[in-house]
Amino acid sequence: MDKGKCRVGMLGEGKIYRRRDLHSKLGGQQQSGISTPSQYPVIMIFSGESGKNYGYKDGWQENDVYYYTGEGQEGDMKFTKGNKAIRDHLLNRKDIWLFKNHKPGLVKFVGKMICTGDHHRTAPDRNGHNREAIIFELILKKK
């Protein structure tokens, strides 16, 4: 896959993909909820119900904004690694691709997103301790 051909057009909204196949083509962290392939201008983010077990509460809000909880299962979240990549995606000219977990090993492509800003609030970590969390506010990018 050429860097120039790595566009949202290669993915279909609502279509199901093997996460393993996405990583084999693009690279990036395979176990993380935020994957930043170094060779392509994309950030793949993965969201699902199992995140609730680790202090993450993602989902659509009434105003068509998707709340996506940043990285970090324990302690206060910081703007490093994937969190920094999402925050700075426009500055770094990287697209955010949102995937929802579908079945084990399979993800559904929701669409190309834009981070409108970040929202801080107190939220429990995976051990139930309150901490500063980073909740990104994302909207679907218009075609």
Image (tube, grey):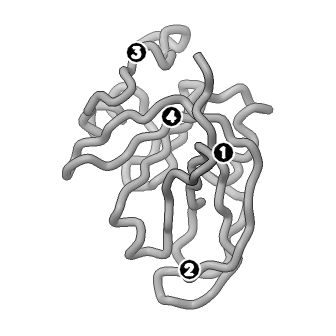
Distance between mark 1 and mark 2 Cα atoms: 19 Å
Q: Position of residue 13 (x, y in %)?
A: 39, 26
Q: Position of residue 119 (x, y in %)?
A: 73, 61
Horizontal side of 16 relative to 66 (left or right) equals left
Q: Which quadrant would residue 85 be assigned to in this image?
A: top right
Q: Which residue is mark 2?
A: 74
Horizontal side of 90 relative to 104 (left or right) equals right
Residue drawn at x 51%, y 49% is: 34
Q: Which quadrant would residue 112 be assigned to in this image?
A: top right
Residue drawn at x 43%, y 48% is: 46
Q: Which residue is mark 1?
A: 86
Q: Given this view, does label 2 or label 4 mark the residue nearer the observer?
A: 4
Q: Which label's residue is closer to the chain start, 3 or 2? A: 3
User: Closer to the camera, 19 or 119?
Assistant: 119
Distance between mark 3 and mark 4 Cα atoms: 12 Å
Q: Which residue is mark 4?
A: 97
Q: How many marks?
A: 4
Residue drawn at x 47%, y 81% is: 126
Distance between mark 2 and mark 4 Cα atoms: 25 Å
Q: Which quadrant would residue 12 be assigned to in this image?
A: top left
User: Closer to the camera, 138 or 82?
Assistant: 138
| Cβ–Cβ under 8 Å for marks 1 and 3 | no
The numbered mark at residue 10 is 3
Q: Residues within 10 Å of mark 4 (few under 14, many from 20)?
A: many
Furthest-right residue in this view = 91
Distance between mark 4 and mark 1 Cα atoms: 10 Å
Q: Residues within 10 Å of mark 2 (few under 14, many from 20)?
A: some
